[in-house]
Image: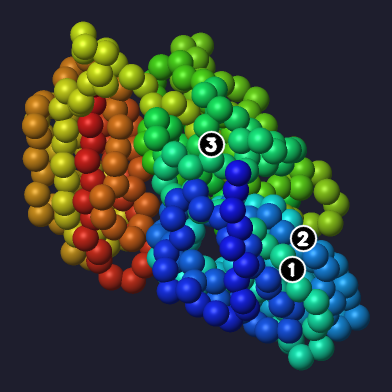
Amino acid sequence: MRSFVAIVVGHALGAALAAGEERTLQVRADQRWTSTGIYVRAGERIEFRADGRVSWGSGRGGPEGGSGGGGYFRPLDEAPVGALIGSVGQQFFFIGERASVRSPDDGELRLGINDDKFSDNEGFFRVEVQTGGRGGSGSSWWDDEPSYGRPTRPPSGRPSYGGNYESFWWRGRVDGSDHLIVQGQSLRVKHEDKLPIQSQDYKFSSALPRQEVDVGLNVIRARGRVEVVERPSRRNDYTAVILVDDSDDNGAFDYELELFWEKPRHSSGGGNERAFDGVFRFRGRVDKGVSVEIQGRTSRLVDDAGGDGSSAQSANFTEALPSKDVVVSLRKIRGRGRVSLVQSPERSNGYTAIVRIEDDSSGADTYEFELGWY
């Protein structure tokens, strides 16, 4: 049986919300932000359910928001006026009636109304919040109330992100139809019609394995059709294809999804999961972009993005990358930009792995990653 705690608006509890715990909050429309006292880490799962109605200017609506009454300088211009939104640090995100999101930053969770003037607003939303951590054992609302456009069950019945699951997270602004083609730790987009995807971002917790795995799909935010149309198999070289189809004529919409799969388990005789056969560890300074080419016991830094000052500080092997087919897994340890596996070792490339580091910010930053194989 779940327990709910009523929180007085504006009262900060100053304590972190434990994974799997739930709270109920009242979010008033006549104030910019409601302090929750809930502190989260970047990447931590937070789930929301909300109801109630509020009014703003000449508009009125529920947590999904509506139209009318201004709100031209609201925090999220792509979301409807009056919608329930959240904030952690300086990052904002849409919530609506139901949402399952990963925290975009470390800090306190705040809730508010997507508007720019609050003196003429009335009403409040009742919001239930549940933290899911990074895969703790707490139950999830998605376990017993699945619905269209929300997370579907993985094979074991557990929600994604954590425990025995890895995932690929993607977000983008879609106007038309596109196929997301996921292989290893790389993404290709096949554009079908209307406008290309805008403001795209994505992240792998680990590479999609080069073996048959049962994949599931969490549709976090969408208004059109989102589905897995091709699952990884030997026939398609272990590739997953996701269709994102926005046929609405009212312009572009922000989509967000996760593809997840169970971590492959390798028997070592005693039934335990086997550790990597070998690991390559890299640390270096990167400006703009570099590629790290790994073959055998050697690595090479290719600075092909015109950066200034990129260099390897350390590059160590526990074992040589073998000249045979292996499953590789990349783990980013440090760095502000994107680290991705763009080429897996195979016969056609002389069993060479290539890790790409892309840094769009000004100046160089320190990056660290591990590439393991078995």
- For label 1, the residue is 125
Please tell me which residue is depicted at 51% across the width and 20% down the height of the picture. Answer: 214
Q: Residue 372: x and y, percent?
A: 23, 31
- Name the residue nearer the viewer: 130 or 244: 130
- Furthest residue in direction bottom, as rendered: 119
Please tell me which residue is depicted at 52% across the width and 24% down the height of the picture. Answer: 156
Mark toward the start of the polypeptide (3 vs 1)? 1
- For label 3, the residue is 159
Mark toward the start of the polypeptide (2 vs 1)? 2
Q: Residue 46: x and y, percent?
A: 54, 54
Q: Is residue 348 left or right of residue 260?
A: left
Quarter of the image that includes the C terminus: top left
Within 10 Å of disc 3 (Cα), the crowding (few <14, some 14-19, many 20+) is many
Disc 2 residue type?
A: Asp
Q: Is residue 241 left or right of residue 334?
A: right
Quarter assignment of residue 60: bottom right
Quarter assignment of residue 307: bottom left
Disc 1 residue type?
A: Phe
- For label 2, the residue is 51
- Name the residue nearer the viewer: 249 or 118: 118
Quarter assignment of residue 257: top right
Disc 2 secondary structure class: strand
